Amino acid sequence: MKYDFGEAIDRCKTNSLKYDFIEERGYPADILPLWVADMDFKIPHETAVAIKKSAEHGIYGYTEPKDSYYRALSGWFEKHFDYPIRQEWVLKTPGVVFALSLAVRAFTKEGDAVLIQRPVYHPFSHVVLNNDRKLINNPLVLKDGKYCIDFDDFEKKIVENNIRLFIFCSPHNPVGRVWTTEELTKIAEICIKHHCIVVSDEIHCDFVLSGHKHRILSSLSQEIADNTILCTAPSKTFNLAGLQAANIVITNPELRKQMYKELTRTGYSQLNSVGLAACQSSYEYGEGWLSQLKEYLGENLKYIRHFLAEHLPQVKLIEPEGTYLLWLDFRETGIEPSELDEFMKHKAKLWLNSGEIFGKEGLGFQRLNIACPRTYLEQAMIRLKTAIDSLL
Ligand SMILES: Cc1ncc(COP(=O)(O)O)c(C=O)c1O
């Protein structure tokens, strides 16, 4: 089946976070939203059929997945990452952020320090601070247009702060890194050496650009797997965020027991039945859709790269290796970093993610979601160029 990702689908009046809360959130009504990480594309045909079948049944009682669900999950990870997943390793949660928070509560106590690497997906900070833990940052270092890990600082922070939990973003949102096997191994070895559990958020694992390869952290060795809480979900890959289903993979029975205990403390048990059906069907049949989608996203990336290089060279694209989120550096535009958000909102009329929400390291940056029809991006680039030109 051939999909048309260029089709503009009206998402207004669907209670969409991206489109239906513009004025409520203080943005001008005519702003173009290119922020939150969901896509303006319809899901795979087979997934839509599975959802309709589930909806049309008319009874929505408590639901548990059968073997076929786990076979679909395992089959996907085996095929794409050479990492089959055993049923008994899986905890199901309504989302990855929910699981990050569970891990903070399960493996640390109030006042303990938790490590993250900013600029990073902002809920990482929230799940630490909202659980009254101390946030410790090992900032990523931007060198020659590429973000790297300062491993000396990483180890020093773990030792000095007696860190027992590190929340890792792989591939990395927002800087777009797909970590190499060497980097992953180093991270894992340092953590094992200092008895620090890694919560590896790999929700973006299916979006990796050519020339790069995503390695599941837990696939590197049994020892690494046994120190890792692997967080996965079909929600980014297949645009199912509203259906709330995540699969958290924990090989170590002791860590799994602790996470499970924390899960039961929340009172949460069964997943949403429609979410389960969508997850299974996507992992079973979504591959063709995904490969067409990745081609389209690749063209979107090319378009933005060329437009900026040709018309707005002062806005620097941090070359992504993965994800559909672009990290744009505005520090050479002459716009004061502290005024950048207002500029985007009122002058360019573009709703991107402010870089600052990912940590102060993101000041002067914006995150652009390119998972939309190309015409939206063309409109966005015209708005951006007109606004920047008007500064001259
Ligand atoms: C790195 C990362 N983790 C988690 C999430 C959200 O996951 P969930 O909706 O399952 O909580 C996102 C969404 O953008 C993300 O980028």
Image (spheres, grey):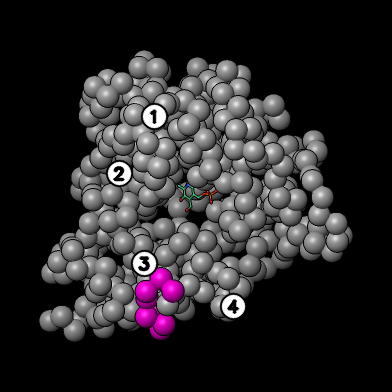
* Image depth: mark 4 or mark 3 in front: 4
Indicate whether residue 284 is drawn in magenta. no
Q: Position of residue 45 (x, y in %)?
A: 72, 63
Q: Is residue 344 above or below residue 65?
A: below
Which residue is identified by label 3?
352
Q: In this view, does 159 lie above or below 216?
A: above
Q: In which quarter of the image is the C terminus?
A: bottom left
In-front residue for pair 21/255: 21
Give the residue type that dot 2 points to. Answer: Arg
Give the residue type that dot 1 points to. Answer: Glu
Q: Which quadrant of the view contains residue 8?
A: bottom right
What is the CA distance from the residue labelled 4 to the residue labelled 2?
Answer: 35 Å
Give the residue type that dot 3 points to. Answer: Leu
Q: Where is residue 292 in the image (x, y as percent from the top left)?
A: 59, 61
Magenta segment range? 24-31
What is the CA distance from the residue labelled 3 to the residue labelled 1?
Answer: 34 Å
Which residue is identified by label 4?
13
